[in-house]
Image: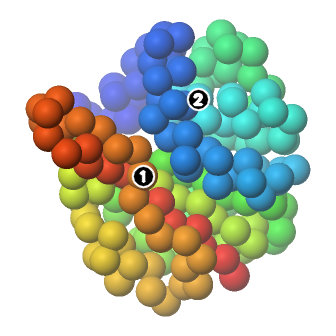
Amino acid sequence: MSGWSDYYPEVESPDRYLGNLFSHREFLDEIIRLQPRRVLEVGAGPSGMSVFLSQLGAEVVSLDNDAQVLEVARRTRDRFGGHNELKLGDAFQLPFPDNSFDVVFHQGLLEHFSDADIHRLLSEQLRVAPVVLMSVPNHNYPRLDFGNERLMHATQWERVLSPRRVALSQYYSKKFFPRWYLVRSPIHYMAKLTR
């Protein structure tokens, strides 16, 4: 695989769209609980979560640095009746003034970066919003989807995030893995960071 546009080659099917929302319902609930008016998703992917949040009435911007990924996001938005704005831009230099959003969120972004880059990304996100909600696959996640993921425990993430104010740190999205008769294991980690 050469880039994210190869990872997201098609528009999401209804099953995948709804399944993804259901899998991340605890994460989405944390965003919704904040009742944000303006929301920024960094690293849009197919932007299914942004589509959903826009359907709930939030003004949502989905940002990605890959025009082909944004084209997949556009087709997803159009297919499912979303209203999110799509923006080409650099997550390390967000093209927005300070305090432009109520919340920034991303799912499946930070696990691809070094600790130093994570701090740079979070600094930029906390510049444009007072709250950042992040979600990543954790150590229970069954595979490396893209190939460079850091599948870490919550304590490892807390150590990486420790210079920041972490208001929430928890696992979520329990799955039966690898066999249905085993204990359900959460496969994602989320954190809420505030200024």
Q: Mark 2: few, some, or many residues within 10 Å (few <14, many ≥20)?
A: many
Task: Kindly identify the amino acid type of the residue bearing the numbered disc 2.
Answer: Gly
The answer to whether 4 is drawn above or below residue 124 in the figure is above
Viewer can see residue 166: yes
Q: Mark 1: few, some, or many residues within 10 Å (few <14, many ≥20)?
A: many
**Quadrant where the C terminus is found in the figure:** bottom right
**Label disc, if present, on residue 172 of the rendered structure:** 1
The residue at 49%/48% (across/down) is 107
In the depicted view, which residue is nearer to us: 43 or 194?
194
The residue at 55%/64% (across/down) is 92
The residue at 64%/47% (across/down) is 29
**Label disc, if present, on residue 162 of the rendered structure:** none
In the depicted view, which residue is nearer to us: 180 or 84?
180
The outermost residue toward the bottom is: 163
Say whether residue 170 is left or right of residue 7.
right
The answer to whether 14 is drawn above or below residue 36 in the figure is above
Q: Looking at the picture, how far across and down is residue 160, in whole percent? A: 37, 79
Q: Looking at the picture, how far across and down is residue 140, in whole percent? A: 21, 51
Task: Kindly identify the amino acid type of the residue bearing the numbered disc 1.
Answer: Tyr
**Quadrant where the N terminus is found in the figure:** top left
Disc 1 versus disc 2: distance between alpha carbons? 19 Å
**Label disc, if present, on residue 48 of the rendered structure:** 2
Say whether residue 80 is left or right of residue 186.
right
The answer to whether 153 is drawn above or below residue 5 in the figure is below
The residue at 61%/45% (across/down) is 28
Q: In which quarter of the image is residue 180?
A: top left
Q: In which quarter of the image is residue 56?
A: top right
Q: Is mark 1 on a helix, strand or loop?
A: strand
Q: Earlier in the sequence, mark 1 or mark 2?
A: 2
Viewer can see residue 42: no
